[in-house]
Amino acid sequence: MGFDSTEHMFWWIFAGSRGGTMRARIVESLRDLPQNANQLAQSLGVNYRTITHHLRILEDSGIVKSEGPRYGKVYFLTDLFRANEGLFEEIVGRARRR
C-alpha cells in the first residue's frame, strides 16, 4: 500500500477500512501492556485468526512490532505510533462519533 503520508496511512488503517475499529482496539490494548496474539484474542473476545490478520496489517504498516519466537511473539507499539498518538486519538474519536 502506498500512502502519501503517515496521516493518510493512519486514516486508512483506523477509519477508512472495514477493520479499523478492531485495529484501534488492538492498539488500545497494547498501550496498556505488550501481549501475544492469544492474549489479545482473549482480552478482546475475538477469534485468534482475526487478531493475527489485523496484527499483520499493523506490523506491515510499522505501527506495531513483534519480538520472540513464532507462536510466542509479543507485540509492542512502535516509535512511529508513539510519535503520532495524538493523530490516532483524533482519528479514532472522529470515527466513533460517526
Image: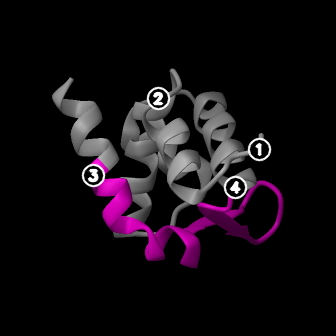
Residue at the disc numbered 4: 59
Camera-side residue of 84 and 46: 84
Identity, as a three-letter code, of the amino acid under mark 2: Val
Residue 10 counted in the magenta span:
no
| Up-down relation of residue 36 to residue 92 (above or below) | below
- The numbered mark, 3 or 2, whose residue comes first in the sequence reads 2
Q: Are marks 3 and 2 in contact (CB under 8 Å)?
A: no
Q: CA distance from mark 4 to mark 1?
A: 15 Å
Q: Nearer the viewer, mark 3 or mark 2?
A: 3
Q: CA distance from mark 3 to mark 4?
A: 21 Å
Q: Nearer the viewer, mark 4 or mark 2?
A: 4
| Residue at image coords 45%, 48% | 26
Identity, as a three-letter code, of the amino acid under mark 3: Glu
**Range shown magenta:** 62-90
Q: Are marks 3 and 4 in contact (CB under 8 Å)?
A: no
| Residue at image coords 50%, 54% | 7
Q: Secondary structure at mark 2?
A: loop
Q: CA distance from mark 4 to mark 2?
A: 19 Å
